Amino acid sequence: MGEENEMVNDMNQPKCRFCDADQSFQKIKGDFVYGGREEQHFWQCEKCQMIYLNPPMTEEEEDKFYKQEFEKFMLNRAGDDKDWSGPEKHFASNQGEVARRLPQLMPFVKEGVRVLEIGCSSGFMLSALKDKGCDVCGVDPSGVFVDYVRSKDIPVYDSCNDVAKQEDPFDLIIHYYVLEHVRYPVKFLQIQMGLLKDGGIMVFEVPCASDPLVELYAIPAFDKFYWSAAHHWYFNKESLSRVLEKIGVAFDLYPQQRYDLSNHMVWMLQGKPGGAGKYSQVFGEELDNAYKEQLKRKWLCDTIIAVLKK
Ligand SMILES: [Zn+2]
């Protein structure tokens, strides 16, 4: 299985880390890796469309990164509109995300529903779902925010293994911006499927590689920002479908656009992140929504939402 074969990859001429297609199908998609080393690039496989980091972090580097360095890495990633400087600030600065994400979850949310979030961070989603009557718990490999989450009476485990030992099956499993960080995405999803009840639902989001700032406007400054050393993969509609087909359950993928027209204009004008909302007084909500809808229609959008049914 291609996912397992990365250790034999030659960094200059990789085979696809996902489907094992040979060197002739691989081309560099992201030359500069933010937070990465000079010899690292994001490659794209013409056969399966998957975009992958090569060479990847070693498992030791990765373990250290998520236990100790991830929150700092995100804090230093200038222009991220979320505040990573502490759990309270992270929680507060993500309330807009809660409002954006909840409508997608509401069909599956009711009193007593058991919810597990993988990568729960400061717990802002779990708190919102707990407020709606759900029975929630989380998994997070980083120790930095967990005390804060536990202080709200929400159990947090180090791994899915610990969850399997101590919790009953779940009705709903969610994860946001996690799968792109995972070395073996198929195995990762299969483990979670084992934690779901029959008929249970999984909802997750990942960045969409056919982001308009890459595929439509091709902004050089964005290209130096986008391809992150913290990611193993960037998915598009086709490649994510290939991953999910291996899980063997029904799924739907939905295009989503998180960033607004102002953010895109600031990238074009100044080559910088952080422009969200800057011109919204002039553009108005109607124009911004129409812009996002059009990008979604073309799958030139920044986010993919996946919904799986066991
Ligand atoms: Zn491939």
Image: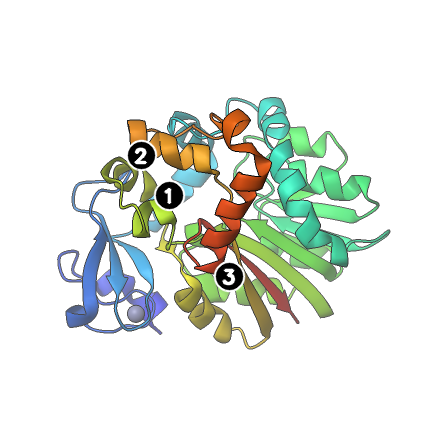
Q: Residues within 10 Å of mark 1 (few under 14, many from 20)?
A: many
Q: Disc 2 or disc 3, which is closer to the eye?
A: 2
Q: What residue appears at the point 75 percent right and 44 percent down from the top-left corner? A: 129
Q: Where residue 287 sits in the image (x, y, percent)? A: 53, 40
Name the residue furthest bottom.
248
Q: CA distance from mark 2 to mark 3?
A: 37 Å
Q: Where residue 308 sits in the image (x, y, percent)? A: 61, 67
Q: Tag 3 or tag 2, which sits nearer the N-term?
A: 3
Judging by the rendered image, the residue that carries numbered circle 1 is: 230
Q: Residues within 10 Å of mark 2 (few under 14, many from 20)?
A: some
Name the residue furthest right.
111
Q: Choose between 70 and 220: the one closer to the eye.
A: 220
Image quarter in which the C terminus is found: bottom right
Determine whether the beta carbon of the residue marked 2 sits less than 8 angstroms from the nearest atom of ligand 1.
no
Q: Choose between 180 and 280: the one closer to the eye.
A: 280
Q: On the image, which quarter does residue 202 sit in?
A: bottom right
Q: What residue appears at the point 77 percent right and 35 percent down from the top-left corner? A: 153
Q: Secondary structure at mark 2?
A: helix
Q: Where residue 166 sits in the image (x, y, percent)? A: 72, 54
Q: On the image, which quarter does residue 131 sit in?
A: top right
Q: CA distance from mark 1 to mark 2?
A: 25 Å
Q: What residue appears at the point 58 percent right and 31 percent down from the top-left corner? A: 145
Q: Secondary structure at mark 1?
A: loop
Q: Residues within 10 Å of mark 3 (few under 14, many from 20)?
A: few
Judging by the rendered image, the residue that carries numbered circle 3 is: 188
Q: Secondary structure at mark 3?
A: helix
Judging by the rendered image, the residue that carries numbered circle 2 is: 268
Q: Disc 1 or disc 3, which is closer to the eye?
A: 1
Q: CA distance from mark 1 to mark 3?
A: 17 Å
Q: What residue appears at the point 66 percent right and 59 percent down from the top-left corner? A: 164
